[in-house]
Image (cartoon, rainbow, N blue to C red):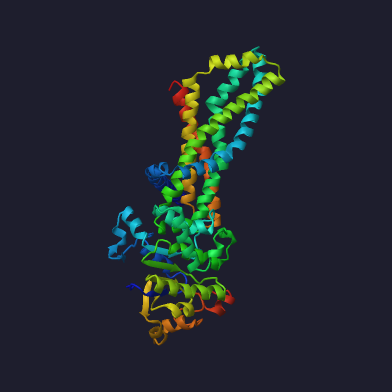
Amino acid sequence: MLDYFQRLGASSLGMFERLGRGSLFFVNVLLSIPSVIIRPRLLISQIHSVGVLSFALIVISGLFVGMVLALQGFYTLSDFGAEGMLGVMVSASLIRELGPVVAALLFAGRAGSALTAEIGLMKATEQLSGMEMMAVDPVARIMAPRFLAGLISMPILATIFSAVGILGGYFIGVGLLGIDEGGYWSQMQAKIDFDQDVINGLIKSVVFGWVVTWIAIFEGYDAIPTSEGVSRATTRTVVHSAFAILLLDFILTALMFGDI
Amino acid sequence: MDIQRGKVTAIMGPSGTGKTTLLKLIGGQLRPTAGTVEVDGQNIHQLRHKELYQLRKKMGMLFQSGALLTDISVFDNVAFPLREHTQLPESMIRHLVLMKLHAVGLRGARDLMPSELSGGMARRVALARAIALDPMMIMYDEPFTGQDPISMGVLVQLIRLLNDALGLSSIVVSHDVKETCAIADYVYLVSAGKVIEHGSPEQLALSDSEWSQQFMQGMADGPVPFHYEAKEYAKDLLGLEA
């Protein structure tokens, strides 16, 4: 029994120690951001690798999520004779919740894991040490551009996800199920509030972009420099990101849309 | 331990004895728990981040793996420190990179990617990169490990040649006795984190220390035993308690 508490205490201390190191690392990354701004080429190449290469995954997923939402929504709404509200239901679900959350989960799986594996392997093959010895700070040269790229890409990807999802809902609702086209768009236009829905959705995606990219680059930087260490770090990135996204989504939703 | 300017100083000892750790201490990548490390008259662990990075511009380091950046070509690897630290025009950088690659015999490999290089070639490219900024000193971490005889011969020759031609101070960490002694001016033998003996290769060859003789002659048994500590063989086979 005492052993159990000892292990629990040690793992809790370890967790707080890692959180502390992660926070210090994040402060270093933030302090290095001005060096990225004066060298936009680094940032652009990272936006390509983190954002543009996630584009296809986001578009295809967004399309199918929108189509499924329209199908499910139609059968539920038709019970109440409210099929005309399908556009509102699809768009509100996507803009407020599914767009930022699902896009962030996909982003963590596609770009977050790639970032961790890349940085972890750079560490394992002494490329980061090599940079340090060439008087090039790896935090400024490698981490900061990737962090900024994630922060910029995530809201754009979430927006694309929601937009494509709304189009997917349109194809199913209007094209397949015969809902009035004008109603689909006009109801959406009337009910979706720019500040309350669109801006709040964007804020969520920025927060998710921050947390996923932070976790991904820190896990890579902190990985044990072996193949097993990198593999574990990559897994941790996806798992921790998923937890963080869902937890932060609850907190943000409560703050933005709840009355608490 | 005193590393002299303009000389090739070797640090030798068995694996796991702290040789690479020593290089990392000199480069400021690790902090010592006791003692001080001075480079060019500066206590490296009391320097601020910026000062440390300034000092590192005067240091080169050749890692065991080469540590080349795998997503860029040989040319770009050698150009990397020049592009990061100088405002030189691209035409000048091209000349400098070709000169450095020529010095290590790999001018013709400039367009290859690191994955296309053999182990020996990768180390030579890393060497060209290490001298790109004309440093005052270079540290070599196990430069001969895993090399075929030709690559090893090339590296041995290059280390001595570059040291003399560029007026460098070189620190070679290795456990390849023959190759290292062939180019070293001074040798430190270390074991379990301590300097056991030091002197010129000739002095060490004549040393009467058993440990030095075992290491220099590559003998399997001696002060460093062949067998890892274990209970008595017969009792172990019979499954008896010691």
The residue drawn where x is 46% and y is 26% is A254
Image check: A113 left or right of B171?
Answer: right
Taking the view exactly as shown, the residue that stands out farthest to the front is B91
From the top left corner, tell me how far across and down residue A183 is, in percent: 62, 13
Task: Mark yes or no: residue A95 visible.
Answer: yes
From the top left corner, tell me how far across and down residue B52 is, in percent: 33, 57
Seen in the picture, residue A246 relative to B14 is either above or below; the reply is above
From the top left corner, tell me how far across and down residue A127 is, in percent: 48, 57
Image check: A105 left or right of B12?
Answer: right
From the top left corner, tell me how far across and down residue B23 is, in percent: 40, 66
Task: Mark yes or no: residue A124 visible.
Answer: no
**If the image is split into quadrants, where does the C terminus of chain A sit?**
top left
Seen in the picture, residue A14 relative to A207 is either above or below; the reply is below
Seen in the picture, residue B2 relative to A126 is either above or below; the reply is below
Asked where in the image residue A171 lies, by quadrant, the reply is: top right
Taking the view exactly as shown, the residue that stands out farthest to the top is A81
